[in-house]
Image (tube, rainbow, N blue to C red):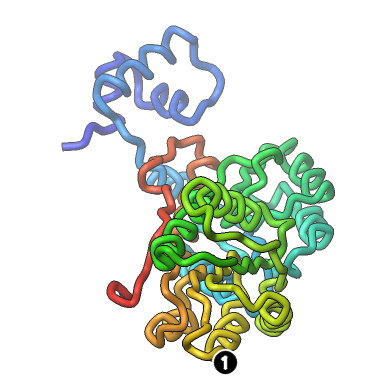
Protein backbone atom coordinates (compact mmCIF):
# COMPACT_ATOMS: atom_id res chain seq x y z
CA UNK A 1 0.00 0.00 0.00
CA UNK A 2 1.37 3.42 -0.93
CA UNK A 3 2.34 5.67 1.99
CA UNK A 4 0.08 8.68 2.50
CA UNK A 5 0.60 12.20 3.78
CA UNK A 6 -0.76 10.99 7.15
CA UNK A 7 2.01 8.37 7.27
CA UNK A 8 4.59 11.09 6.61
CA UNK A 9 3.15 13.28 9.38
CA UNK A 10 3.19 10.36 11.83
CA UNK A 11 6.76 9.35 10.88
CA UNK A 12 8.06 12.93 11.20
CA UNK A 13 6.09 13.65 14.38
CA UNK A 14 4.41 16.76 12.93
CA UNK A 15 0.91 17.85 11.91
CA UNK A 16 -0.70 17.32 8.51
CA UNK A 17 -0.65 21.09 8.00
CA UNK A 18 3.12 21.18 8.54
CA UNK A 19 3.69 18.41 6.00
CA UNK A 20 1.51 20.29 3.52
CA UNK A 21 3.53 23.48 4.04
CA UNK A 22 6.82 21.63 3.48
CA UNK A 23 5.59 19.81 0.36
CA UNK A 24 4.33 23.08 -1.12
CA UNK A 25 7.51 25.01 -0.21
CA UNK A 26 5.64 27.56 1.90
CA UNK A 27 7.31 29.69 4.54
CA UNK A 28 6.85 29.51 8.28
CA UNK A 29 8.49 26.10 8.90
CA UNK A 30 11.77 25.75 10.79
CA UNK A 31 14.74 24.23 8.95
CA UNK A 32 14.98 21.34 11.42
CA UNK A 33 11.29 20.51 10.87
CA UNK A 34 11.73 20.63 7.10
CA UNK A 35 14.58 18.13 7.40
CA UNK A 36 12.44 15.81 9.55
CA UNK A 37 9.64 15.85 6.99
CA UNK A 38 12.02 15.34 4.06
CA UNK A 39 13.71 12.45 5.88
CA UNK A 40 10.32 10.85 6.53
CA UNK A 41 9.38 11.23 2.86
CA UNK A 42 12.63 9.52 1.88
CA UNK A 43 12.33 6.66 4.39
CA UNK A 44 8.73 5.89 3.46
CA UNK A 45 9.20 6.31 -0.30
CA UNK A 46 6.30 8.76 -0.33
CA UNK A 47 5.34 9.99 -3.83
CA UNK A 48 3.03 12.97 -3.92
CA UNK A 49 -0.13 12.73 -6.03
CA UNK A 50 0.16 16.17 -7.65
CA UNK A 51 -3.03 15.73 -9.66
CA UNK A 52 -5.09 15.20 -6.54
CA UNK A 53 -3.29 18.03 -4.77
CA UNK A 54 -3.95 20.40 -7.63
CA UNK A 55 -7.62 19.47 -7.78
CA UNK A 56 -7.98 20.05 -4.05
CA UNK A 57 -6.41 23.50 -4.45
CA UNK A 58 -8.40 24.08 -7.67
CA UNK A 59 -5.18 24.92 -9.50
CA UNK A 60 -5.44 25.73 -13.21
CA UNK A 61 -2.68 25.29 -15.79
CA UNK A 62 -2.26 26.95 -19.17
CA UNK A 63 0.39 25.57 -21.49
CA UNK A 64 1.25 27.11 -24.87
CA UNK A 65 2.79 25.17 -27.77
CA UNK A 66 4.41 27.06 -30.65
CA UNK A 67 4.57 24.76 -33.69
CA UNK A 68 5.60 25.58 -37.29
CA UNK A 69 2.71 25.82 -39.73
CA UNK A 70 2.74 24.48 -43.30
CA UNK A 71 2.69 21.13 -45.06
CA UNK A 72 5.24 19.30 -42.90
CA UNK A 73 3.37 16.06 -42.11
CA UNK A 74 5.27 15.39 -38.91
CA UNK A 75 4.52 18.86 -37.53
CA UNK A 76 0.84 18.40 -38.37
CA UNK A 77 0.84 15.08 -36.51
CA UNK A 78 2.62 16.68 -33.54
CA UNK A 79 0.02 19.45 -33.49
CA UNK A 80 -2.84 16.94 -33.67
CA UNK A 81 -1.37 14.96 -30.76
CA UNK A 82 -0.99 18.11 -28.64
CA UNK A 83 -4.59 19.14 -29.35
CA UNK A 84 -5.85 15.64 -28.49
CA UNK A 85 -3.92 15.61 -25.21
CA UNK A 86 -5.30 19.03 -24.37
CA UNK A 87 -8.85 17.77 -24.87
CA UNK A 88 -8.22 14.83 -22.54
CA UNK A 89 -6.71 17.05 -19.84
CA UNK A 90 -9.49 19.64 -19.63
CA UNK A 91 -11.13 17.77 -16.77
CA UNK A 92 -7.86 18.11 -14.82
CA UNK A 93 -8.05 21.91 -15.20
CA UNK A 94 -5.33 21.98 -17.88
CA UNK A 95 -5.74 24.33 -20.88
CA UNK A 96 -3.53 23.74 -23.91
CA UNK A 97 -3.16 26.30 -26.69
CA UNK A 98 -1.35 25.82 -30.01
CA UNK A 99 0.07 28.85 -31.84
CA UNK A 100 1.12 28.38 -35.47
CA UNK A 101 4.44 29.96 -36.44
CA UNK A 102 5.91 30.43 -39.95
CA UNK A 103 8.64 27.78 -40.34
CA UNK A 104 12.32 28.83 -40.21
CA UNK A 105 11.33 32.34 -39.03
CA UNK A 106 13.13 33.19 -35.80
CA UNK A 107 11.75 36.72 -35.61
CA UNK A 108 8.17 35.46 -35.96
CA UNK A 109 8.79 32.91 -33.21
CA UNK A 110 10.30 35.61 -30.97
CA UNK A 111 7.36 37.93 -31.62
CA UNK A 112 4.91 35.17 -30.63
CA UNK A 113 6.88 34.54 -27.43
CA UNK A 114 6.88 38.26 -26.64
CA UNK A 115 3.07 38.34 -26.94
CA UNK A 116 2.69 35.72 -24.20
CA UNK A 117 1.82 37.23 -20.83
CA UNK A 118 3.95 35.36 -18.25
CA UNK A 119 1.26 35.99 -15.63
CA UNK A 120 -1.21 33.91 -17.63
CA UNK A 121 0.87 30.88 -18.62
CA UNK A 122 2.21 27.88 -16.70
CA UNK A 123 4.71 26.69 -19.31
CA UNK A 124 5.73 26.87 -22.96
CA UNK A 125 6.84 24.28 -25.54
CA UNK A 126 8.37 25.31 -28.84
CA UNK A 127 10.19 23.94 -31.88
CA UNK A 128 13.32 26.01 -31.43
CA UNK A 129 15.01 28.29 -33.94
CA UNK A 130 18.42 29.52 -32.79
CA UNK A 131 17.96 33.21 -33.53
CA UNK A 132 19.15 36.02 -31.21
CA UNK A 133 15.61 37.39 -31.01
CA UNK A 134 14.35 33.99 -29.77
CA UNK A 135 17.10 33.89 -27.16
CA UNK A 136 16.11 37.35 -25.91
CA UNK A 137 12.45 36.36 -25.67
CA UNK A 138 13.34 33.21 -23.69
CA UNK A 139 15.57 35.21 -21.36
CA UNK A 140 12.57 37.45 -20.59
CA UNK A 141 10.34 34.47 -19.83
CA UNK A 142 13.04 32.82 -17.72
CA UNK A 143 13.11 35.97 -15.62
CA UNK A 144 9.51 35.25 -14.67
CA UNK A 145 10.31 31.61 -13.88
CA UNK A 146 8.25 30.22 -16.79
CA UNK A 147 9.32 26.63 -17.66
CA UNK A 148 10.16 26.13 -21.34
CA UNK A 149 10.76 22.87 -23.21
CA UNK A 150 12.13 22.60 -26.72
CA UNK A 151 10.58 20.05 -29.08
CA UNK A 152 12.16 18.16 -32.01
CA UNK A 153 14.95 20.73 -32.43
CA UNK A 154 16.89 21.96 -29.42
CA UNK A 155 18.54 25.26 -28.47
CA UNK A 156 20.83 24.14 -25.62
CA UNK A 157 22.51 27.53 -25.16
CA UNK A 158 19.16 29.28 -24.67
CA UNK A 159 17.21 29.34 -21.37
CA UNK A 160 15.07 26.21 -21.36
CA UNK A 161 14.09 23.54 -18.85
CA UNK A 162 14.47 20.48 -21.06
CA UNK A 163 14.71 19.20 -24.63
CA UNK A 164 12.15 16.63 -25.77
CA UNK A 165 13.04 14.77 -28.95
CA UNK A 166 15.40 12.20 -30.37
CA UNK A 167 19.18 12.35 -30.27
CA UNK A 168 19.60 13.85 -33.72
CA UNK A 169 23.31 13.06 -33.97
CA UNK A 170 22.46 9.41 -33.32
CA UNK A 171 19.70 9.62 -35.96
CA UNK A 172 22.20 10.86 -38.56
CA UNK A 173 24.68 8.15 -37.61
CA UNK A 174 21.93 5.57 -37.95
CA UNK A 175 21.06 6.82 -41.45
CA UNK A 176 24.70 6.55 -42.51
CA UNK A 177 25.01 3.01 -41.16
CA UNK A 178 21.83 1.94 -42.95
CA UNK A 179 22.94 3.40 -46.29
CA UNK A 180 26.41 1.91 -45.92
CA UNK A 181 24.93 -1.54 -45.37
CA UNK A 182 22.34 -1.20 -48.12
CA UNK A 183 24.95 -0.12 -50.69
CA UNK A 184 27.46 -2.82 -49.81
CA UNK A 185 30.74 -2.57 -51.78
CA UNK A 186 29.49 0.05 -54.25
CA UNK A 187 31.30 3.36 -54.60
CA UNK A 188 29.62 6.67 -55.33
CA UNK A 189 28.13 9.89 -54.07
CA UNK A 190 25.33 10.45 -51.55
CA UNK A 191 22.79 13.25 -51.95
CA UNK A 192 21.82 15.09 -48.75
CA UNK A 193 18.56 17.06 -48.56
CA UNK A 194 17.60 19.21 -45.55
CA UNK A 195 14.91 21.71 -44.71
CA UNK A 196 17.36 24.32 -43.46
CA UNK A 197 20.84 24.03 -42.02
CA UNK A 198 19.87 26.83 -39.64
CA UNK A 199 17.92 24.22 -37.65
CA UNK A 200 19.94 22.41 -35.02
CA UNK A 201 18.21 19.06 -35.59
CA UNK A 202 19.11 19.10 -39.30
CA UNK A 203 22.64 20.27 -38.54
CA UNK A 204 23.15 17.53 -35.93
CA UNK A 205 21.79 14.82 -38.23
CA UNK A 206 24.20 15.86 -40.96
CA UNK A 207 27.08 15.89 -38.49
CA UNK A 208 26.29 12.37 -37.27
CA UNK A 209 25.84 11.15 -40.85
CA UNK A 210 29.21 12.45 -42.00
CA UNK A 211 30.99 11.12 -38.90
CA UNK A 212 30.01 7.56 -39.79
CA UNK A 213 30.55 7.99 -43.53
CA UNK A 214 34.12 9.24 -43.07
CA UNK A 215 35.02 6.60 -40.49
CA UNK A 216 33.31 3.52 -41.88
CA UNK A 217 32.35 4.08 -45.52
CA UNK A 218 35.09 6.15 -47.19
CA UNK A 219 34.04 4.78 -50.60
CA UNK A 220 30.82 6.83 -50.24
CA UNK A 221 31.05 10.61 -50.63
CA UNK A 222 28.34 12.86 -49.15
CA UNK A 223 27.61 15.84 -51.38
CA UNK A 224 26.93 19.36 -50.07
CA UNK A 225 23.46 19.67 -48.58
CA UNK A 226 20.65 21.10 -50.70
CA UNK A 227 17.84 22.82 -48.79
CA UNK A 228 14.17 22.31 -49.53
CA UNK A 229 12.61 24.37 -46.70
CA UNK A 230 10.60 21.25 -45.72
CA UNK A 231 8.34 22.01 -48.69
CA UNK A 232 7.55 19.30 -51.24
CA UNK A 233 7.85 21.41 -54.40
CA UNK A 234 10.96 23.28 -53.26
CA UNK A 235 12.56 19.98 -52.26
CA UNK A 236 11.62 18.34 -55.57
CA UNK A 237 13.17 21.17 -57.58
CA UNK A 238 16.35 21.30 -55.47
CA UNK A 239 16.87 17.54 -55.65
CA UNK A 240 16.14 17.39 -59.41
CA UNK A 241 18.74 20.11 -60.01
CA UNK A 242 21.31 18.25 -57.92
CA UNK A 243 20.75 14.90 -59.62
CA UNK A 244 21.00 16.50 -63.06
CA UNK A 245 24.41 17.91 -62.09
CA UNK A 246 25.58 14.74 -60.29
CA UNK A 247 24.57 11.68 -62.35
CA UNK A 248 26.66 9.35 -60.17
CA UNK A 249 24.48 9.61 -57.06
CA UNK A 250 23.77 6.14 -55.63
CA UNK A 251 22.34 7.04 -52.24
CA UNK A 252 20.09 9.70 -50.71
CA UNK A 253 19.44 10.87 -47.17
CA UNK A 254 16.53 13.23 -46.60
CA UNK A 255 17.45 14.88 -43.32
CA UNK A 256 14.19 16.79 -42.86
CA UNK A 257 10.70 16.87 -44.31
CA UNK A 258 9.67 17.56 -47.92
CA UNK A 259 9.38 13.81 -48.43
CA UNK A 260 6.69 14.11 -51.09
CA UNK A 261 9.11 15.98 -53.34
CA UNK A 262 11.79 13.36 -52.76
CA UNK A 263 9.36 10.54 -53.50
CA UNK A 264 8.28 12.17 -56.79
CA UNK A 265 11.90 12.25 -57.93
CA UNK A 266 12.53 8.65 -56.91
CA UNK A 267 9.37 7.42 -58.61
CA UNK A 268 10.34 9.14 -61.86
CA UNK A 269 13.88 7.72 -61.87
CA UNK A 270 14.62 4.50 -63.81
CA UNK A 271 14.82 1.63 -61.29
CA UNK A 272 18.36 0.72 -62.37
CA UNK A 273 19.68 4.19 -61.51
CA UNK A 274 17.38 5.04 -58.61
CA UNK A 275 19.33 6.07 -55.45
CA UNK A 276 18.94 4.00 -52.30
CA UNK A 277 17.02 6.31 -49.96
CA UNK A 278 16.69 6.79 -46.20
CA UNK A 279 14.13 9.36 -45.03
CA UNK A 280 12.71 10.72 -41.79
CA UNK A 281 9.28 10.28 -40.16
CA UNK A 282 6.65 7.64 -40.76
CA UNK A 283 3.81 9.39 -42.61
CA UNK A 284 1.26 8.11 -45.14
CA UNK A 285 3.61 9.23 -47.95
CA UNK A 286 6.76 7.62 -46.58
CA UNK A 287 4.86 4.47 -45.63
CA UNK A 288 3.66 4.11 -49.24
CA UNK A 289 7.16 4.81 -50.53
CA UNK A 290 8.63 2.11 -48.31
CA UNK A 291 6.07 -0.43 -49.43
CA UNK A 292 6.69 0.51 -53.07
CA UNK A 293 10.44 0.12 -52.69
CA UNK A 294 11.18 3.79 -53.37
CA UNK A 295 12.54 4.31 -49.85
CA UNK A 296 14.59 1.66 -48.07
CA UNK A 297 14.27 2.80 -44.45
CA UNK A 298 12.45 5.38 -42.34
CA UNK A 299 13.93 6.93 -39.21
CA UNK A 300 11.08 7.95 -36.95
CA UNK A 301 10.25 9.73 -33.70
CA UNK A 302 6.91 9.28 -31.96
CA UNK A 303 4.95 12.55 -32.11
CA UNK A 304 2.42 11.27 -29.57
CA UNK A 305 5.15 10.42 -27.10
CA UNK A 306 6.66 13.88 -27.55
CA UNK A 307 3.33 15.62 -26.96
CA UNK A 308 2.62 13.57 -23.83
CA UNK A 309 6.17 14.02 -22.57
CA UNK A 310 6.11 17.78 -23.08
CA UNK A 311 2.92 18.14 -21.05
CA UNK A 312 4.16 15.84 -18.28
CA UNK A 313 7.46 17.71 -18.03
CA UNK A 314 5.81 21.14 -18.06
CA UNK A 315 3.41 20.09 -15.30
CA UNK A 316 6.29 18.67 -13.27
CA UNK A 317 8.26 21.89 -13.69
CA UNK A 318 5.23 23.98 -12.70
CA UNK A 319 4.71 21.81 -9.61
CA UNK A 320 8.36 21.50 -8.67
CA UNK A 321 7.95 17.73 -8.99
CA UNK A 322 10.57 15.21 -10.23
CA UNK A 323 10.67 13.99 -13.82
CA UNK A 324 10.86 10.26 -14.54
CA UNK A 325 13.75 10.28 -17.00
CA UNK A 326 13.20 6.84 -18.53
CA UNK A 327 9.59 7.64 -19.39
CA UNK A 328 10.50 10.88 -21.18
CA UNK A 329 13.30 9.49 -23.36
CA UNK A 330 12.30 9.71 -27.05
CA UNK A 331 13.83 6.85 -28.99
CA UNK A 332 15.16 6.71 -32.54
CA UNK A 333 12.90 4.20 -34.32
CA UNK A 334 13.79 2.41 -37.57
CA UNK A 335 11.19 1.08 -39.96
CA UNK A 336 11.82 -1.22 -42.90
CA UNK A 337 9.19 -2.68 -45.18
CA UNK A 338 9.21 -5.81 -42.98
CA UNK A 339 8.29 -4.16 -39.67
CA UNK A 340 5.83 -1.42 -40.61
CA UNK A 341 3.23 -1.00 -37.85
At x 61%, y 69%, the residue is 191
At x 42%, y 48%, the residue is 328
Q: Quadrant of residue 111?
A: bottom right
Left or right: residue 194 compared with residue 13:
right
**Residue that mark 1 sits on:** 268
Between 27 and 46, the residue placed more toward the observer is 46
Counting from the top left corner in percent of width and height, residue 82 is at 52, 66
Assess disc 1: are there few (<14), some (14-19) or many (≥20) residues with their C-alpha within 10 Å of its C-alpha.
few
At x 49%, y 84%, the residue is 285
Task: For the N terminus, give its image quadrant.
Answer: top left
Between 319 and 84, the residue placed more toward the observer is 84
Counting from the top left corner in percent of width and height, residue 41 is at 32, 23
The vertical placement of 123 against 325, above or below, is below
Counting from the top left corner in percent of width and height, residue 140 is at 78, 41
Counting from the top left corner in percent of width and height, residue 72 is at 61, 75
Total numbered circles: 1
Task: For the C terminus, give its image quadrant.
Answer: bottom left
Q: Quadrant of residue 68?
A: bottom right
Q: Secondary structure at mark 1?
A: helix
Between 183 and 290, the residue placed more toward the observer is 183
The vertical placement of 220 against 337, above or below, is above
Do we see residue 166 in this rendering? Answer: no
The vertical placement of 228 against 309, above or below, is below
Do we see residue 30 in this rendering? Answer: yes
Between 36 and 324, the residue placed more toward the observer is 324
Q: Quadrant of residue 40?
A: top left
Amino acid sequence: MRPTIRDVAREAGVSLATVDRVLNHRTGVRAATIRRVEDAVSRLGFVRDTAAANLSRRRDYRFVFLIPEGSNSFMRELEAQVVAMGARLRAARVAVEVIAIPPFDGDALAAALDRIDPREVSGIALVATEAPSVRDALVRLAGFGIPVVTLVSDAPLFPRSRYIGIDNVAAGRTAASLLGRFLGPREGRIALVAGSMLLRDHMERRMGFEQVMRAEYPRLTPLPVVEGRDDAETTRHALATLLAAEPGVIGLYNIGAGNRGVIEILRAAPPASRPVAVVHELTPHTRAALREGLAHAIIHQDAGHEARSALRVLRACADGAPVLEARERIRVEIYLRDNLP
